[in-house]
C-alpha cells in the first residue's frame, strides 16, 4: 500500500489543479495528508509555451506544493472525451494503484470544453474502478477493484455555485506561487508571445479576488469552492464552520 494517497488531484491540463485547488492541496499536505497529482494532457495545444516548457513548470510546481508524485498520462489535448474507453482504463489503473479516498478533478461546466469532458471522464473512471469484472494490470501486477469515497470538482473559469468551500486563509500566497510557476502561461509584461484570455493581469488578479469572494461567503479571508458528485455527509454538526 506504499503507493496509496489520501487525495488524488487530476487536471486535464498542467496548471488546472494549481488554479482550481492549489490552496486546498497545500493546506492538506501541511495538515499531514498525502497528495498526488495527475495531468491528463501536456497542454500541447496551448497558444503560449510548449509541452516541454509546461512539463518543467509542472515539475517545479509539484516541488513547491510538496506532492508525493506528479505524472502525466499523455492524452491528446483538445480531444479528451468522457466515452473514450482507452482513457477510462488508464485512469482506472491509476485509481487502483493510488487508492485515493478523495479525487479532485476539473469543473463540471467551464469555458474550455476539455474541462467538463475531463470532469465526466474522471467521474466515470472512478465508478468503473470499483467494478470487479473490469480487470486491469499495472506494471505486471493484477489490480484489485477500488472506488474513491468522494469525487469533487474544483471551480475554474466559470463562476459555478459551489456545494461547499474550503478555507485557504494563510495559503493564498503559496497558491499564487504555484500558479505563477507557469510563467509561460500567465501575466508577464516582458513576454513577446500572443495574448490569451489567461495571460492578462486581470486574469491573474481574478484568481485572488475569486478566492476572496468565496471566503467572504463563509466569513474568512480566502477560500476555494467545490462541487460534489454525491451528497456530502457530516458526522457532527460542529464540523460546519
Image (cartoon, helix red, strand yellow):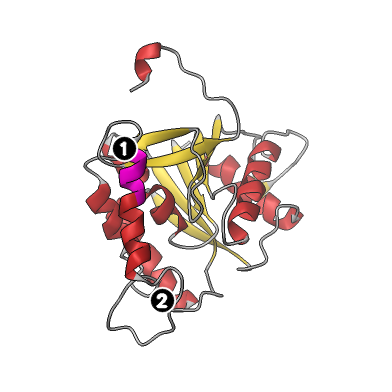
User: Does residue 66 show up?
Assistant: no
Query: Which of the 4 quarters of the picture holds residue 53?
Result: bottom left
Would you say 64 lies left or right of 142 here? left
135, 233: nearer the viewer: 233
Q: Is residue 213 magenta?
A: yes
Q: CA distance from mark 1 to mark 2?
A: 36 Å
| Whole-percent x, y for residue 131 in the image | 73, 34
Residue 87 visible, this orientation: yes
**Rendered position, 206 above or below 34:** below
Label 1, residues with CA under 10 Å away: few <14, some 14-19, many ≥20: few
Mark 2 Cα within 10 Å, few/some/many (few <14, many 20+)? Answer: some
Residue under the image location 47 percent in, 39 percent down: 226
> In the rendering, at what x and y percent does residue 136 appear?
70, 45
Specify the segment rendered in magenta: 210-215
SS under mark 1: helix
Q: Is residue 160 placed above or below 149 in the rendered structure?
A: below
Which residue sits at x=28%, y=57%?
Answer: 176
The stretch drawn in magenta includes residue 82: no
Question: Which residue is the extreme one toward the right?
Answer: 133
Residue drawn at (30%, 45%) of the image: 212
Q: Dot 2 corresponds to which residue?
A: 53
The front one of 66 and 223 is: 223
Read off the residue under disc 1: 216
Q: Give the quarter of the figure containing the C terminus.
A: top left
What SS does tag 2 mark?
helix
40 to the left or right of 145: left
Q: Indicate which disc residue 24 carries.
A: none
* 17 lies left or right of 24: right
- Pinpoint residue 179: horizontal percent, then vertical percent: 34, 60
Which residue lies at the image location 48% right of the left edge and 58% below the top edge? 71
Q: Is residue 211 above or below residue 196?
A: above
Can you give x and y, in whole percent of width and height, for residue 206 in the image?
35, 57
Amino acid at each position: 500500500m506504499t503507493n496509496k494517497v489520501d487525495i488524488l488531484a487530476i487536471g486535464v491540463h498542467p496548471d488546472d489543479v494549481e488554479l482550481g485547488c492549489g490552496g486546498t492541496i497545500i493546506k492538506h499536505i501541511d495538515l499531514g495528508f498525502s497528495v498526488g497529482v495527475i495531468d491528463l494532457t501536456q497542454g500541447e495545444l496551448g497558444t503560449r509555451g510548449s509541452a516541454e516548457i509546461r512539463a518543467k513548470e509542472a515539475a517545479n510546481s509539484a516541488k513547491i506544493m510538496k506532492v508525493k508524485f506528479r505524472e502525466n498520462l499523455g492524452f491528446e489535448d483538445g480531444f479528451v472525451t468522457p466515452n473514450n474507453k482507452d482513457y477510462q482504463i488508464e485512469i482506472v489503473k491509476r485509481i487502483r494503484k493510488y487508492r485515493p479516498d478523495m479525487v479532485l478533478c476539473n469543473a463540471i461546466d467551464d469555458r474550455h470544453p476539455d474541462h467538463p469532458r475531463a470532469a465526466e471522464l474522471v467521474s466515470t473512471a472512478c465508478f468503473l474502478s470499483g467494478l470487479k469484472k473490469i480487470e486491469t494490470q499495472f506494471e505486471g501486477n493484477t489490480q484489485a477493484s477500488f472506488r474513491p469515497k468522494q469525487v469533487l470538482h474544483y471551480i475554474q473559469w466559470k463562476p459555478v455555485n459551489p456545494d461547499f468551500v474550503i478555507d485557504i486563509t494563510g495559503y493564498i500566497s503559496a497558491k499564487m506561487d504555484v500558479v505563477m510557476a507557469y510563467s509561460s502561461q500567465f501575466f508577464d509584461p516582458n513576454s513577446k508571445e500572443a495574448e490569451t484570455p489567461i495571460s492578462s493581469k486581470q486574469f491573474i488578479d481574478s484568481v485572488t479576488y475569486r478566492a476572496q469572494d468565496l471566503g467572504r461567503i463563509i466569513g474568512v479571508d480566502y477560500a476555494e469552492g467545490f462541487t460534489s458528485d454525491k451528497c456530502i455527509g457530516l458526522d457532527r454538526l460542529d464540523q460546519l464552520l
